[in-house]
Image (spheres, grey):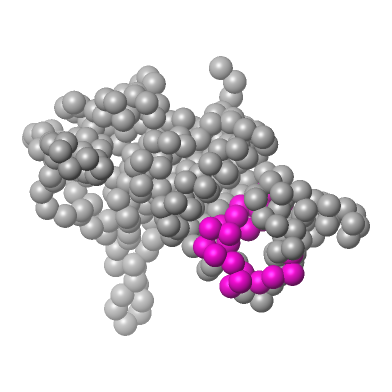
């Protein structure tokens, strides 16, 4: 097998919590704890979990929009956690991000032409205005936007159109890898389908690799090659999308999938209802973080965090289903 485009090794991100008169550190939020995975060229790795489990923080740490506390991130064999600002700036051409809220991520004072021109100017990808306009026109065509949109501002577009502008902006520097941070969660369901289909078409045409972060399990199943499930800062299960949805092995994954609504009032689906609430990342439980809510938890779950099984279907659980 060829080397993965992206490889994350033992990534950790702690956010210090300060208090008292002198602002000393009194604790830390464990946002990402010892996460490792890889993404092959041309595939889509879906990343799912409850709100607050660390998905977005992980995506930002991979791009070094947030500096990780420890661990390594290899992009095309190069450890980007060791790069200086000048080297990292050159690498940013190859890695981009699409944010959750398309309106908040666009400058309201810039026209579409200015928004799409800016990354090209930063990375010096066009030697003349004609060349720049030619590339912008191609981006608009790729993303299903009219060329007459160039002189309009973000507030003049619908939510779906704004997200298409964000996708076009990410593509302006011709990247290989894109972190998609819940790119459809702020959109209507009918528009979600259009954006997902657009992203799949772009992936085939341009050879893109995605890390697709979401909490909508049906969307992730549709677009992903493989899926990783996060709980309280850790990846608890990783498998191919087909295998994970057909045969979830971690109790948390089983509970998540059992909560997917079925649009058939006559269908009787068994639900796995978890007890209690998600523990605080300020003070995560000892051992397996899921054991206070797990129906299968036993003594060793409270003492030791299980190691990940090797193979195509990896699960961190002493008693997988």
Residue at position x 12%, y 53% from top?
276
Q: Against 155, is 261 above or below?
A: above
- Name the image quarter holding the C terminus: top left
Q: How many marks?
A: 0
Q: Would residue 308 be visible to someone looking at this image?
A: no
- The N terminus, quarter of image: top right
The residue lying at 67 percent from left, 55 percent from top is: 145
Residue extending furthest toward the bottom: 21
* Residue 213 in the image, given as x and y percentages of width and height: 44, 47
- 41 lies left or right of 220: right
Q: Does 160 appear in magenta?
A: yes
Using residue 215 as the reference point, say whether residue 64 is left or right of it: right
Residue 104, percent across and down? 53, 68
Instruction: Left or right? Give the position of 204 relative to 280.
Output: right
Whole-percent x and y of residue 258?
A: 21, 38
In terms of depth relative to the viewer, which is nearer, 22 or 1?
Answer: 1
Residue 163 appears in which quarter of the rendering?
bottom right
Above or below for 146 versus 292: below
Q: Which quadrant of the figure has residue 133?
A: bottom right
Q: Position of residue 85 (x, y in %)?
A: 67, 55
Please identify the dominant SS of the magenta region.
helix
Which residue appears at 29% of the width and 26% of the height?
Answer: 246
Rendering quarter of residue 259:
top left
Of residues 252 and 224, the one nearer the viewer is 224
Can you see residue 254?
yes
- Identified at 39% across, 36% down, the residue is 221
Tell me which segment is drawn in magenta.
150-172
Magenta highlight on residue 112: no
């Amino acid at each position: 097998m060829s080397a993965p485009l992206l490889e994350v090794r033992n990534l950790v991100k702690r956010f210090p919590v300060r208090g008292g008169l002198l602002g000393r550190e009194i604790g830390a939020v464990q946002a990402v704890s010892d996460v490792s995975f890889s993404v092959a060229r041309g595939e889509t790795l879906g990343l799912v979990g409850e709100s607050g489990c660390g998905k977005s923080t992980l995506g930002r740490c991979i791009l070094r929009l947030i500096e990780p506390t420890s661990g390594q991130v290899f992009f095309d064999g190069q450890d980007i956690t060791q790069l200086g600002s000048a080297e990292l700036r050159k690498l940013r051409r190859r890695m981009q991000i699409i944010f959750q809220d398309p309106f908040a991520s666009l400058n309201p004072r810039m026209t579409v032409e200015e928004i799409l021109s800016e990354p090209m100017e930063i990375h010096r990808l066009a030697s003349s205005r004609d060349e720049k306009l030619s590339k912008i026109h191609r981006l608009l065509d790729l993303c299903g936007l009219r060329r007459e949109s160039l002189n309009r501002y973000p507030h003049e577009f619908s939510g779906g159109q704004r997200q298409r502008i964000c996708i076009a902006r990410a593509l302006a520097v011709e990247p290989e890898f894109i972190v998609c941070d819940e790119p459809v969660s702020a959109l209507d369901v009918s528009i979600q389908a259009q954006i997902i289909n657009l992203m799949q078409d772009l992936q085939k045409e341009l050879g893109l690799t995605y890390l697709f972060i979401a909490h909508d399990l049906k969307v992730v199943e549709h677009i992903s090659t493989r899926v990783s499930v996060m709980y309280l800062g850790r990846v608890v299960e990783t498998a191919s999308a087909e295998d994970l949805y057909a045969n979830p092995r971690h109790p948390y994954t089983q509970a998540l999938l059992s909560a997917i609504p079925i649009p058939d009032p006559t269908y009787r689906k068994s639900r796995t209802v978890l007890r209690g609430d998600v523990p605080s990342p300020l003070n995560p439980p000892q051992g397996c973080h899921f054991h206070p809510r797990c129906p299968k938890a036993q003594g060793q779950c409270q003492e030791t965090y299980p190691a990940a099984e090797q193979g195509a279907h990896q699960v961190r659980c002493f008693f997988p289903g």
